[in-house]
Amino acid sequence: VQLQASGGGLVQTGGSLRLSCTAPRFTLDDHIISWFRQAPGKEREWVSYIGSGNGATYYSNSVKGRFTISKDSAKNTVYLHMNSLKPDDTAVYFCAADSSVSVMESWSEYDYWGQGTQVTVSS
């Protein structure tokens, strides 16, 4: 496991969580980072992306306006701030990294993955 994701938990609808992604063995700032999620019985879904350096950020339509991706280079950590959570956001969330990708939404493009952190939103 090259990345470590943490911060998941159980939260009520409308609540907030902050997920963290760290990399003990390489510098996240040199890589592009995406968050994906996978709910039971569903395919892995791309959620958000942040570019290397002063990277651009992108979001899926399902989370745009509610989630924010950011990074703290000094802490070698990328965050996913999740607000206004809904039951449909319930999933295991993964962070993924690579030096570059052709299609940011395609999970198979990424070489480095974390173990995932469970987010459960109760109604």
Image: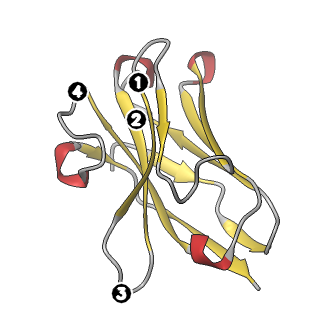
Which quadrant does the C terminus fall into? bottom right
Question: Which mark is on residue 51?
Answer: 1
Q: Residue type at mark 4?
A: Ser
| Extreme residue toward the top, this view | 54
Question: Which mark is on residue 33?
Answer: 2
Badge 4, how many Cα within 10 Å: few under 14, some, many 20+? some
Percent x, y for residue 45? 37, 62
Percent x, y for residue 32? 35, 28
Query: Left or right of 11: which side holds 69?
Result: left
| Extreme residue toward the front, this view | 61
Depth check, front residue: 97 or 13: 13
Q: Is residue 60 above or below residue 41?
A: above
Question: Secondary structure beneath disc 4?
Answer: loop
- Mark 4 / mark 1, whichever is N-terminal: 1
Query: Left or right of 21: which side holds 86?
Result: right
Question: Secondary structure beneath disc 2?
Answer: strand
- Mark 1 / mark 2, whichever is N-terminal: 2
Identify the image quadrant of residue 28.
top left
Q: Is residue 24 above or below residue 35?
A: above
Q: CA distance from mark 3 to mark 2?
A: 25 Å
Q: CA distance from mark 4 to mark 3?
A: 29 Å
Q: Residue type at mark 1?
A: Gly
